């Protein structure tokens, strides 16, 4: 009985009742696969149909009976500045949030390289934000950034004059509470990842660099960072994907207001589908987004696969 | 004379919680000398190395490099080179970048760096893999890179932590002579930590044998080999290991003689030891095996023959013990009997209580 | 390198304390607000620590009738939209999260086992499940709404459970896969020598060995389900309500958000997440990177 016998479909390993069910291994994945089919694959196919219609549920026509308008949705999307703005805005959010999260995480993790009595407590507190339900965290930030909230209060104390800035109603600045909420919530995750990476660094390479006379900065940038690259890449990829999907903070804090100024891609699609009920149009947008996102991910993930 | 001393340890101590790793260590290393710190696992040699390099601070005593006390000095200022047991080659940098790293950190200008790197890679046969990635090398290549990386910075003192233990046995012999040659060429002062006494014996100018945190004996290889200071050193050095058998020293007609399980009346002229029970230590090379009985031989049975190619080691009965004798190949087979004689002048008497070797003056053996 | 000058160490520890304060502050505010009386919710200057702590908000969460008395006491300016007690939300969330977690872990374990031991579907098959996590859920939600309307799954427990199961399968498959991979095949082989089928060997030998990991995966997925908002928002219409939706209900037409009540609801509903999160702390990294990074 060697382990090599069990490549591929059940061959020599089948005994007992499983002998009577060919392709046992396929049966095992069936529940998962069927669930995926129902909730993901079939809906994706449906998107293909919806994207070429102008289905609006308010018109009381069943979606499969909607009239196809073929590629006009895509044409409209192309010229829809609200859509393109949403895309660009989302990319901006991803770029800023992820880089800030990474920077903070790196800085923080370096503070945790040595041991001290309350280190474990410190880690537990710092990862607390990760474990708050995003909707409730968003609510907390809503209160913090209220015109009469603690943040404005602190600023008032510093500048000496009452400061009642309405963050969440300002077209330019409303994005800040959203991004800060996201950064606050997910930097701890990056911190954990980077810390794990740092703790697993080959210690002797660092020591060798020390003996060779390198300054701490040189050691960090030339030795430690390259060794951290795999961990950082994974962290960046995963956080970028998740940040791109950002929805909860946007919904709770601004709903995309004022006037679409904080509309991210997810918010745009939500508003389009469930406020304006233009589901066919949004399906086209969804299709575009899906295609682009998945292509990028596949392109990026291939070299990652090779690094295990 | 004192300017010549590159490294000195005076009464260096180190404990971890309640475990004393190093007790009052004294050591001195001269310029250009190759000193081995030899001892079994846990004897404190790696701890000592870490203190010399600067990764651990001694609890007491002083460490001096080039006459300067460096106890509190961070590693990067000590002008010491260190090769780790696992080599710790920078896996994400090229070999070239590895070699240049120390020089870059010291601020050496580019042209000089290139020259130095080219020179050292010639010396260590690394010239055609300068662009390979550190992580892609095999063990022996890594060792050379690790060595070249520190040698190129011309350290005052080179520390090597069991550098051969990760290599195949077949490589070690050639690498030992290569390393020794390089050391001689560069007149590099080397402190070599190892548990392998063959390495220590073949490469060192001096050996310091360590056990349980203290240096038992320090001296040239011949001295350690021929005049071990106690039971442990006698047993640790030498391959095959020295034979230890119980013996008794008696006074017979005004002269001291040694009696063992097989031999008796061995004359101890020239030594002054009290009568009593001792241990006798005699190297396998100092026992002779004969097919026929002769004067001074005793009969013994061969239990095991180990074939080492150029010589055989026979494990033969000696009273309740087994001793090893070195013979030419094909001398005898297992189960046969032979006749053993012992050269008392080459043997050591060891006190049973403090396990120290009793010193003696050389003299002719009285029959 | 344990010889840093004292002031450097002091700075480092201070930075850590600052980080801890920043991490904790919004949470503090949430908890603090949950104990504030109505007039201190959004007063100016804001109340950092209330001098009149009250359980009123918590009472309203569980007994919405309390809000009515409260409103009349406040001269009736507080009308509200709270459709029901939070009990239902907790119940619904518990049911949905638990079942979705169960399905996800069971299906995931079976699939992971098949993938690891039999390489089912080839080497790219596991990545199919990853693509699910790459797409913004909102993109798939529109056709799901359409699909559910035909299947009559809109606003049902089963519909939401199904959706949650599908979207957490990537985690369960990849996490459990990494746990199974750590158990050498030879152990199952040894059991099979005694006459067991490979699957039975898996159940009796491998599974007990990874049960810690499976449990951690389950808790992890439970957290994800419990905290989920978007699907709950879109796929329900009042019949089913989760804790995340319930918070959004504490809004009144005249007074806007009922901060105190929302804070109370938020505090309570987040407690399980915090609890489970700390229990599986060691496995968080593995989970959130789909098994790519293990400690």
Image (tube, rainbow, N blue to C red):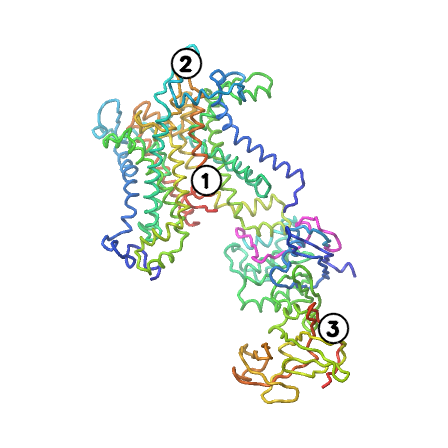
Q: Are marks 2 and 1 on the same chain?
A: yes
User: For residue B359, which numbered disc appears in the image?
Assistant: 3
The alpha-carbon separation of the residues under discs 3 and 2 comes to: 104 Å
Q: How many C-alpha atoms fall within 10 Å of the one at disc 2: few (<14), some, or many (≥20)?
A: some
Q: Magenta segment, principal secondary structure? A: loop
Mark yes or no: residue C253 visible. Answer: no
**Image marks 2 and 1: residues in contact by CB distance under 8 Å:** no
> What residue is at 66 percent from the left and 69 percent from the top?
B231
Say above or below: B69 vs C251. below
Judging from the image, mark 3 belongs to the subunit labelled: B
The alpha-carbon separation of the residues under discs 1 and 3 comes to: 67 Å
Q: Which residues are magenta?
A: B64-93
Left or right side of B70 for A302: left
User: Quadrant of the rendered structure where residue B146 is?
Assistant: bottom right
Say above or below: C13 vs B34. above
Coordinates of residue C208 in the picture (x, y in percent)? 38, 50
Residue sitting nearer the eye, C251 or C31:
C31
Say above or below: C222 vs B186. above
Q: Which residue is mark 1?
A: C279
Left or right side of C207 for B328: right
Q: Are marks 3 and 2 on the same chain?
A: no
The alpha-carbon separation of the residues under discs 2 and 1 comes to: 41 Å
Task: Quarter of the image for the C terminus of chain B: give it.
Answer: bottom right
Q: How many C-alpha atoms fall within 10 Å of the one at disc 3: few (<14), some, or many (≥20)?
A: some
User: For residue C71, which numbered disc appears in the image?
Assistant: 2
SS under mark 3: loop
Q: Is residue B81 magenta?
A: yes
Judging from the image, mark 2 belongs to the subunit labelled: C
């Amino acid at each position: 009985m060697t382990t090599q016998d069990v490549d591929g479909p059940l061959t020599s390993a089948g005994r007992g009742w499983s002998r009577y069910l060919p392709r046992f291994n396929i049966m095992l994945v069936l529940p998962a696969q069927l669930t995926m089919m129902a909730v993901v694959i079939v809906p994706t196919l449906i998107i293909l149909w919806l994207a070429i219609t102008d289905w609006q549920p308010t018109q009381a026509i069943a979606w499969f009976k909607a009239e196809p308008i073929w590629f006009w949705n895509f044409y409209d999307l192309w010229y829809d500045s609200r859509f393109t703005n949403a895309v660009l805005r989302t990319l901006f959010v991803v770029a800023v949030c992820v880089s800030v999260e990474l920077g903070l995480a790196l800085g923080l993790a370096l503070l945790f390289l040595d041991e001290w009595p309350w280190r474990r407590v410190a880690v537990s507190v710092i990862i607390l934000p990760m474990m708050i339900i995003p909707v409730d965290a968003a609510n907390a930030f809503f209160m913090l950034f209220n015109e009469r909230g603690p943040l404005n209060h602190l600023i008032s104390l510093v500048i000496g004059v009452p400061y009642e800035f309405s963050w969440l109603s300002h077209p330019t600045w409303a994005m800040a509470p959203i991004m800060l909420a996201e950064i606050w919530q997910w930097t701890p995750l990056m911190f954990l990842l980077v810390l794990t990476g740092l703790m697993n660094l080959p210690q002797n390479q660092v020591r060798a660099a020390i003996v060779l006379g390198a300054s701490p900065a040189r050691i960090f940038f030339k030795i430690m960072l390259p060794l951290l690259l795999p961990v950082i890449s994974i962290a960046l990829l995963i956080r970028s994907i998740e940040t791109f999907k950002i929805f909860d903070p946007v919904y709770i804090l601004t709903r995309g207001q004022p006037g679409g100024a904080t509309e991210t891609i997810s918010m745009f699609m939500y508003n389009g589908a469930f406020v304006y009920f233009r589901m066919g149009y949004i399906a086209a947008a969804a299709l575009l987004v899906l295609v682009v996102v998945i292509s990028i991910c596949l392109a990026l993930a291939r070299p990652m696969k090779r690094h295990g | 004379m004192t300017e010549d001393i590159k490294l000195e340890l005076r009464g260096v101590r180190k404990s971890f919680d309640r475990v004393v790793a190093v007790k009052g260590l004294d050591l001195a290393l001269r310029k250009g000398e190759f000193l081995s710190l030899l001892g079994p696992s846990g004897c404190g040699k790696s701890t000592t190395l870490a203190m010399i390099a600067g990764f651990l601070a001694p609890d007491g005593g002083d460490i001096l490099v080039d006459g300067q006390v460096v106890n509190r000095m961070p590693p990067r200022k000590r002008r010491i080179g260190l090769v780790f047991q696992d080599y710790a080659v920078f896996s994400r940098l090229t070999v070239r970048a590895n070699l240049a790293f120390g020089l870059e950190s010291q601020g050496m200008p580019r042209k000089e760096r290139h020259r130095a790197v080219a020179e050292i890679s010639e010396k260590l046969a690394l010239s055609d893999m300068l662009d390979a990635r550190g992580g892609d090398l095999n063990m022996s290549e890594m060792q050379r890179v690790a060595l070249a990386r520190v040698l190129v910075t011309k350290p005052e003192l080179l520390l090597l932590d069991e550098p051969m233990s990760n290599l195949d046995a077949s490589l070690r012999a050639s690498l030992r002579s290569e390393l020794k040659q390089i050391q001689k060429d560069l007149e590099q002062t080397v402190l070599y930590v190892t548990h392998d006494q063959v390495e220590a014996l073949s490469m060192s100018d001096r050996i310091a044998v360590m056990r349980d945190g203290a240096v038992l004996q320090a001296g040239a290889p011949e001295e350690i080999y021929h005049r071990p200071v106690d039971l442990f050193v006698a047993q640790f050095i030498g391959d095959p290991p020295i034979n230890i058998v119980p013996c008794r020293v008696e006074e017979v007609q005004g002269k001291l003689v040694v009696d063992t399980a097989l031999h008796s009346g061995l004359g101890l002229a020239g030594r002054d030891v009290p009568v009593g029970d001792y241990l006798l230590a005699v190297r396998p090379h100092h026992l002779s095996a004969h097919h026929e009985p002769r004067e001074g031989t005793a009969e013994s049975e061969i239990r095991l023959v180990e074939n080492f190619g150029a010589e055989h080691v026979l494990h033969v009965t000696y009273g309740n013990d087994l001793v090893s004798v070195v013979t030419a190949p094909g001398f005898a087979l297992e189960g046969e009997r032979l006749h053993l004689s012992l050269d008392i002048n080459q043997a050591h008497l060891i006190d049973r209580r403090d396990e120290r070797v009793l010193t003696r003056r050389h003299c002719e053996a009285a029959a | 390198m344990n010889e840093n000058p004292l002031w450097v160490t002091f700075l480092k520890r201070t930075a850590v304390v600052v980080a801890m304060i920043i991490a904790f502050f919004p949470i503090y505010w949430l908890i603090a607000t949950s104990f504030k009386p109505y007039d201190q919710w959004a007063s100016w200057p804001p109340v950092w620590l209330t001098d009149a702590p009250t359980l009123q908000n918590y009472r309203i969460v569980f007994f919405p009738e309390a809000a009515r008395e409260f409103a009349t006491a406040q001269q009736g300016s507080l009308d509200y939209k709270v459709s029901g007690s939070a009990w239902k939300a907790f119940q619904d969330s518990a049911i949905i999260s638990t079942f979705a977690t169960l399905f996800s872990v069971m299906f995931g374990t079976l699939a992971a086992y098949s993938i690891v031991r039999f390489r089912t579907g080839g080497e790219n098959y596991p990545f199919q499940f990853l693509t699910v996590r790459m797409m913004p859920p909102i993109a798939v939600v529109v056709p799901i709404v359409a699909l559910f309307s035909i299947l009559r799954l809109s606003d049902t427990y089963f519909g939401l459970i199904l959706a949650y199961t599908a979207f957490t399968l990537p985690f369960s498959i990849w996490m459990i896969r990494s746990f199974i991979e750590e158990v050498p095949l030879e152990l199952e082989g040894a059991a099979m020598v005694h006459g067991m089928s490979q699957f039975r060997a898996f159940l009796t030998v491998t599974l007990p060995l990874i049960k810690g990991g499976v449990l951690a995966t389950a808790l992890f997925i439970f957290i994800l389900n419990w905290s989920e908002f978007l699907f709950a928002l879109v796929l329900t219409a009042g019949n089913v309500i989760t804790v995340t939706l319930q918070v959004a209900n504490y809004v009144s037409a005249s007074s806007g958000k009922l901060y105190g009540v929302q804070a109370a609801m938020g505090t309570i509903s987040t407690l399980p997440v915090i609890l489970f999160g700390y229990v599986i702390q060691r496995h968080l990294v593995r989970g959130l990177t789909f098994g790519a990074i293990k400690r």
